[in-house]
Amino acid sequence: MTDIRIDAAKAEQIITQILRDDKSLPPADANAVAANICRRLLTTRTNSPLDVYRIIPRAPPYGGDFATAVATKLAESKSEPRIANELWQLVYDQGRCLRVV
């Protein structure tokens, strides 16, 4: 599904205009309804299935690829700022999904 991104104020203006033109609502009513619609849209949570979330354990995996990759990154360059991003990418890449209990 494609995401539509629009400024909240612009969305409210568009909705207000549609309500006035198509439903012949008075300006004050159209403004109130449009504001209510936008408020609801901003506070609505999307329900996604659990399989789209990446759940990783609190402790890193022992041994294996993760420990080797972290040691290699730290040995490469200890002073560069990009190391934090690269380490986080390793955590994300090596994270394993946990069973939902």
Image (cartoon, grey):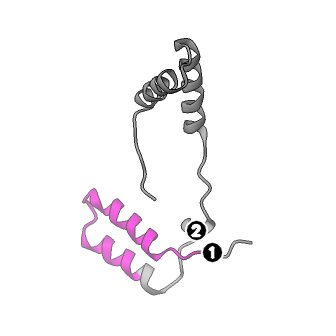
Left or right for 39, reference 92 = right
Residue numbers of the magenta segment = 68-97
Mark 1–mark 2 contact, CB under 8 Å?
Answer: yes
Residue nearest the viewer, comparing 62 with 48: 48
Which of marks 2 and 1 precedes in the sequence? 2
SS class, disc 1 = loop
Left or right for 84, reference 96 = left
Q: Image height check: is 80 above or below 57?
A: above
Q: Image height check: is 45 above or below 42?
A: below
Left or right for 62, reference 80 = right
Dominant secondary structure of the magenta stretch? helix
**Residue at image location 48% in from the left, 29% down from the top:** 15
**Label 1, on which residue?**
98
Looking at the rendered structure, the kind of residue marked 1 is: Leu
Q: Quadrant of residue 57?
A: bottom right
Q: Image height check: is 47 above or below 30?
A: below
Q: Quadrant of the C terminus?
A: bottom right
Query: Total of numbered circles in the picture?
Result: 2
Label placed on residue 68:
none
Give the residue at the far right of this rendering: 101
Q: Quadrant of residue 69?
A: bottom left
**Residue at image location 29% in from the left, 74% down from the top:** 75
Q: Image height check: is 13 above or below 56?
A: above
**Label 2, on which residue?**
55
Give the residue at the far bottom of this rendering: 64
